[in-house]
Image (tube, rainbow, N blue to C red):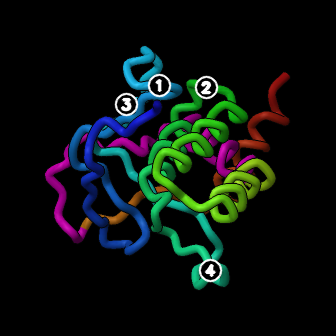
Amino acid sequence: MSRFTDVLLVSPLADGSTWVIMRDFGYDVGAEASGDHIEVAVGFQTDFATIPRPFWIILPKWGRYGNATVIHDWLYWTQARPRPQADAIFLEAMGVLGVSGPVKYTLYWAVRLFGGLAWYRNAADRAAGFDRVLPDVHLRAVFRSERRGTLRRVAGHAWRLMRRP
């Protein structure tokens, strides 16, 4: 059976919505020791579940699915696997965590329907030289994420793509 390989240890940044991975954290896909392993880098910045604020009363940013959202954020950042596969791993990881069916499928279908924006934003961030992995994990709570707004980053990336010959 799939499993998380370590306890998730994070520390918040001063912006109140970004957290940093403080020690090794990974996930075995498919089955334990299957050879298909995801390792999240120490220093990676995550916002856990990107759920619009009005829905937080039903689905908070952090819940039983928290570890799975970090793996999903990492897969969306690295883009080493196709987006549908990243979403399928997210669904599998929520099952490992014992997330209830209604919550698990609501979150899965939300990323299938709306995750494209985050996928392209991450591509734009990477193209602009932004790195969500902080080199120095000896952080203080006064540090803020340097990530710019979604619309500005995606619009700039789209503009650069349109200007290519």
Residue 64 percent location from the top left of the image: 46, 62
Vertical comparison of 7 with 164: above or below: below
Mark 4 and mark 2 lie on one chain; the one further toward the N terminus is: 4
Residue receiving disc 3 = 39
Amino acid type shown at disc 1: Ala
Residue 155 percent location from the top left of the image: 74, 52
User: Magenta stretch containing residue 77, yes or no?
Assistant: no
Label 2 crowding class (10 Å Cα cut-off): few <14, some 14-19, many 20+?
few
Q: Determine the CA span between mark 4 and mark 2.
A: 30 Å
Q: Determine the CA span between mark 2 and mark 1.
A: 18 Å
The residue depicted at 46 percent of the width and 32 percent of the height is 2
The residue depicted at 59 percent of the width and 31 percent of the height is 79
Residue receiving disc 4 = 58
Residues shaded magenta: 115-142
Vertical comparison of 77 with 67: above or below: above
Front residue of this view, candidates 7 and 154: 7
Whether label 4 touches label 2, CB < 8 Å: no
Q: Determine the CA span between mark 3 and mark 4.
A: 30 Å
Is label 2 or label 1 in front? 1
Q: Which mark is residue 81?
A: 2
- Element carrying mark 3: strand
Vertical comparison of 80 with 134: above or below: above
